[in-house]
Image (cartoon, rainbow, N blue to C red):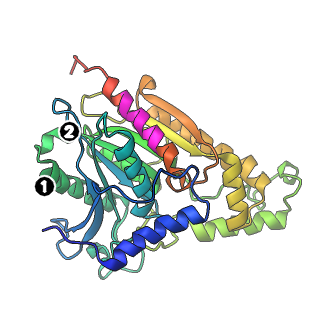
Amino acid sequence: MRSQLSIAHCLYIVNELASTFAQGKMGTPLPAMMLPRELTHDTIVLSHKPTAKIHYTYTAGNEPEEAPRRLIVFLNGLMTDKSTWLPVMAGIIRNRKDNGYPSLLAYDRYGQGLTEDRDPQDKGQDKGRGHNIADVVHDLHQLVIQIWTDKIRKPQCEIRLIFVANSIGCAIARLYAMFYPGRAEALLLLDPMITNSDFDWFPDPDSKDFDPMALPDDVSIDVLREQRTKFANFFAPDVINKEGLDRRDLADHLPDSNGPLLKAPDGRGPILTVVEHDPERFASESLQSMGTPVSLSMKYTNPLWHRYNQGLLQTTEPNLAVGPVVAKNCGHFVQRDDPSFVVDQLSSLLNRLELQPPDVSV
């Protein structure tokens, strides 16, 4: 049975959107703040975790009758929730009303956003040491099955997914495509988290190979040590996060950015777009939030991240990959900083998907 949003939840969504615009975090605002009536908000209980509810936002697609049914799934990072996707969903509905769009789904994982229930799997475990990234992927699969069955009402063998993801959500999207091959038809990855790192991105002054002359002129060894400590305390895989997702084995699941090769429903690779943050905007935000000298970000963090994103393009066939596309004036949370840019990238991806010829060899 469909549940109604409480007044508190409605105010939460409105306030999140309003504060985002007020703080100037978004690029070009969408035409209106009012969310389309097509977007519905509800809770769902996953069949394998019957004691907890997940909050989600959904709209049915308006694809042509002859087109295959598809579901776009928006995947959050650790520091955002599904409210950041609402302007993107609204933009797709408005901009593609005539051309058609797939069904849209955004959700808050256990312990995140409007999903107040914790992951039942965490019960009896040490804080932050319960469910891991693989559990999140399996939860996502069950959510997809239930939405596909209850809302789209097509056989499970016809599942075709498009993932739009940010940060660790990109890792979730990749792992889903690996664990459940032949389901993910396209991926739009927005500033993916670097999965094969412990965020030890800056030179170690205690290493025998350390060259102090290689540091930027405005960075002392004391500042370097301070930044290494800050990053370790805030970003390292063993740091506990609000939702309790244990990231310690993330690098084991995704040790490389350039593999493995993913498979779409037709046997080929998925259509892929990789987006990365604006280096200058990211360096500026890192200075504000972490006190990281701009020169450190520009010399170490941004080049390393760019190489990682270049590797991601090799997870599909060369003619199906686009990027890395720089999201101008956007930091790490691209969908928050410029939802209109994400709408454009997603629309372009959908157009590429529609133009994709059938693979007669399959």
Residue under the point 30% across and 82% down: 124
What x and y, as percent, mark residue 151? 16, 53
Q: Residues within 10 Å of mark 2 (few under 14, many from 20)?
A: many
Q: In the rendered view of the protein, which quadrant contains the N terminus?
A: bottom left
Q: Which residue is mark 2?
A: 69
What x and y, as percent, mark residue 233? 61, 71
Q: Is residue 318 left or right of residue 265?
A: right
Q: Answer yes or no: is residue 261 visible.
A: no
Q: Are marks 1 and 2 in contact (CB under 8 Å)?
A: no
Secondary element type, mark 2: loop
Q: Which residues are magenta?
A: 343-352
**Magenta segment includes 348:** yes
Q: Which residue is mark 1?
A: 150
Q: In the rendered view of the protein, which quadrant contains the C terminus?
A: top left
* Foreground residue among 226 and 102: 102
Q: Amino acid at mark 2?
A: Arg
What x and y, as percent, mark residue 184? 30, 40
Q: Is residue 348 above or below residue 41?
A: above
**Mark before the other along the chain sequence, 1 or 2:** 2
